[in-house]
Structure formats: C-alpha cells, structure tokens
Image (cartoon, grey):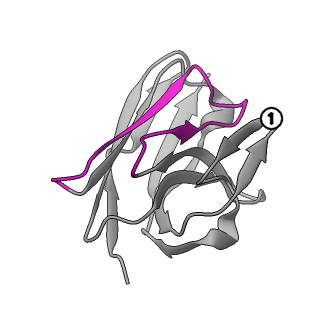
Amino acid sequence: QVQLVESGGGSVQAGGSLSLSCVYTENRACMGWFRQAPGKEREAVAVRTTNSGRTYYPDSTKGRFLAHQNLAKKTLYLQMDDLKPEDTALYFCAAGRSHTYYSGSDYYQCGPRITEYTDWGQGTQVTVSS
C-alpha cells in the first residue's frame, strides 16, 4: 500500500496561484491529483503516467494547472495558476494502476477513472475567493 501526504493548500484570491506537493512512499504507474467540492463527486484535475510523464488534464484545468513529478524524491507536484472560485475543493493525491483511457482520439495509460486509484492521501484544502 502506498502512503501519500499532501501539503500546500490554502486560501487565495481569484486569479492567484498555489502549489501543492504530495510525498509518497512508492512510485506507481499512475499518479494523480483529484478534488472534491462539497456536494460534488470527486474528479481528476491532473493525472500523470509515471514512465512517460504524459499527463491528462480535463478541460476545467487544462492550461491553468501543471503536474510534475520527482521520481527520486517520490514527490508529485501541482502548480495551479489563474485560480477560480470553482476550483475551491479538497485536493487529493492518489496512486493507481495503468488503464486504457481515450479522450477523443488521444490515448492515455492513466486517465481520470477514480476506481483505478487504490491509494489516497488525506487531502489538502484549497479555497479561492472572488
């Protein structure tokens, strides 16, 4: 089982930036960031395929969020820019197995399917005010 610990959450005004970090105990094929707002389902915001670095972003975060990874330090990062009030949520880091996912004609080894992620951190809160 992979242990994951997130840090870096906080409060920021709309248009601002935040950086999150996730330290984990073991590299897995898929490492991702997810979020869950009150009353909403958990959703992926950036999912990274470890061996290639290829990253899936949903339309809601594409161009604003950037995930990167330091394999030696076993750390996953999320740089969030141009934050919006709708980005307010509890952000989780997760590790999972590779799985086939298509976004249109684009193929990913790691996608946003939550059931493929077996290990989760406790989350860090991000609050964006207008």
Residue 2 spot, x, y in % from top left: 35, 77
Residue 10 spot, x, y in % from top left: 39, 41
Query: Up-down: is 88 above or below 100?
Result: above
- Give the left or right position of residue 113, taking residue 3 as reference: right
Observer-nearest of 50 and 5: 50
Q: Residue at x 34, y 68 (%)?
A: 4
Observer-nearest of 66 and 52: 52
Observer-nearest of 104 and 96: 104
Give the class, few, some or many, for how many residues have Cα within 10 Å of label 1's Cα (few <14, many ≥20): few
Query: Up-down: is 79 above or below 6?
Result: above
Question: Quarter of the image holding residue 105?
Answer: top right
Q: Which residue is mark 1?
A: 105
Magenta stretch encompasses residue 110:
no
Observer-nearest of 54 and 9: 54
Residue 7 spot, x, y in % from top left: 31, 52
The residue type indicated by label 1 comes to Ser
- Does dot 1 land on a helix, a strand or a loop? loop
Extreme residue toward the right, this view: 104
Residue 84 spot, x, y in % from top left: 62, 25
Q: Residue at x 63, y 70 (%)?
A: 116
> What is the count of numbered marks?
1
Magenta stretch encompasses residue 63:
yes
Segment tinted magenta in the rendering: 51-73
For the N terminus, give its image quadrant. bottom left
Query: Up-down: is 123 above or below 56?
Result: below
- Give the left or right position of residue 41, taking residue 20 as reference: right
What's the magenta bit mostly, secondary-structure-wise?
loop
Extreme residue toward the left, this view: 72
Q: Residue at x 68, y 72 (%)?
A: 115
Question: Quarter of the image holding residue 123?
Answer: bottom left
Extreme residue toward the bottom, this view: 1
Q: Residue at x 45, y 62 (%)?
A: 29
